[in-house]
Amino acid sequence: MELITLAQEWFAVTLLIGIAMLIWGGNLLVEGSVAIATKLGISKLVIGLTIVAFSTSSPELALNLVASINGHSDLCLGNIFGSNIANIGLVLGIGALICKLPVTGRVVKFEFPWLIAATFLVGVVTWFDSLNALWAIGFLLLFSFLMWSWFRIGKEETSKIGTQSKEATPTVRVSMLGAWAMLLFGLLMLGLGGKATEIGAVTGALELGMSELLVGSTVVAIATSLPEVVTTIIAAKKNHPDLAVGNVIGSNIFNILLVLPITILVSPISASKDIGIYIIIMFAMTVIAYILTRINRIKLKDGGIIDPKEGGILVSLYIAFLVGISIWALS
């Protein structure tokens, strides 16, 4: 108890320590997960949509579990919606700035539309209804269907492309035992980092007169999205666009169809009256990103591409969101 009190008094330091632990834990989890997936021969698109997406969404899950137990529902929603906005505007935008990101026909036809539909559904439920256990179960069932679909496709792709997944994914030169050790230690760091970040963020919000929703959707959302940033930059620089785009789309689906319902099952959430603006921006950013993939059509099985200019548009929109929402919330 005295340790928690001390952490609250030094909230800025606690927040920074928590963020550092989230980043460290997230990186370990990513490296361990990718190493395991590579050894098992899973295709790069499915790695991005599932294992890497889950790994990079783990900071959001760790933070939300701790915050939900302590009754900070606004911080939970702000973190989830803010992270999805950051993933589209910041993560995907930075990836496109580094190099052109081809988006395969499968992603354009199925994954992006599924993300848009899921974002719309979750947004409507959050805005007009109470986020209770019934909705949580419904979201989890939809998530389970998508997971089944991805692994089925991954199995088909793996049989067709053989060793392509091993060549296309970041290589981590560790044994299977070492990879699992990295994954488990990463989970431990995420749990501790989630608690530290929650204490620092909530205390800081009270000290600075900011709402939990604002802190969750800006400071905490950026912090928990940093693993996505790191993974996308690595994938883009190594010319693995499927991994980069799959990471972003998969992480957003994980956030709203896995992290959110788990958070609800821990403690039902009643959204504040200010949540509407975040829902609108999250949905709009997702649709804009999808439209950008359709502007520059390429011969990639009816796919598209997000070039550096369009990446700049996404990053600029995200900066405008940060400035606008801060002015609006503090006015």
Image (spheres, grey):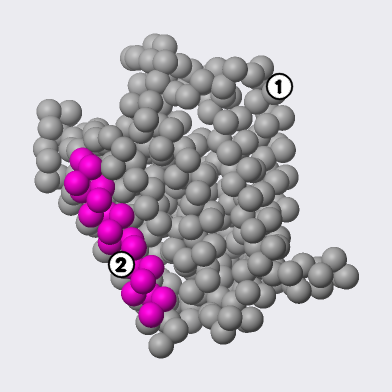
- Which SS type dominates the magenta stretch? helix
> Which of 77/193 is in front?
193
- Write down the residue under mark 2: 320
Q: Is residue 159 visible?
A: no
The residue indicated by pointer 1 is: 177
State the image quarter where residue 158 is shown: top left
Mark 2 packing: few (<14 Cα in 10 Å), some, or many (20+)? few
Q: Of the residues shown, which amino acid type is indicated by label 2? A: Ala
In magenta, the rendered stretch is 306-327
Number of callouts? 2
Left or right of residue 280: residue 24:
right
Q: Position of residue 98 (x, y in %)?
A: 31, 38
Is residue 210 a member of the stretch shown in magenta? no
- Identify the mark at residue 83; answer none if there is no mark: none
**Whole-percent x, y for residue 22 in the image:** 62, 50
Amino acid bearing label 1: Leu
Judge depth for marks 1 and 2 and give the one in front.
2
Residue ID at (49%, 78%):
271
- Relative placement, left or right, of 162 versus 262 is left
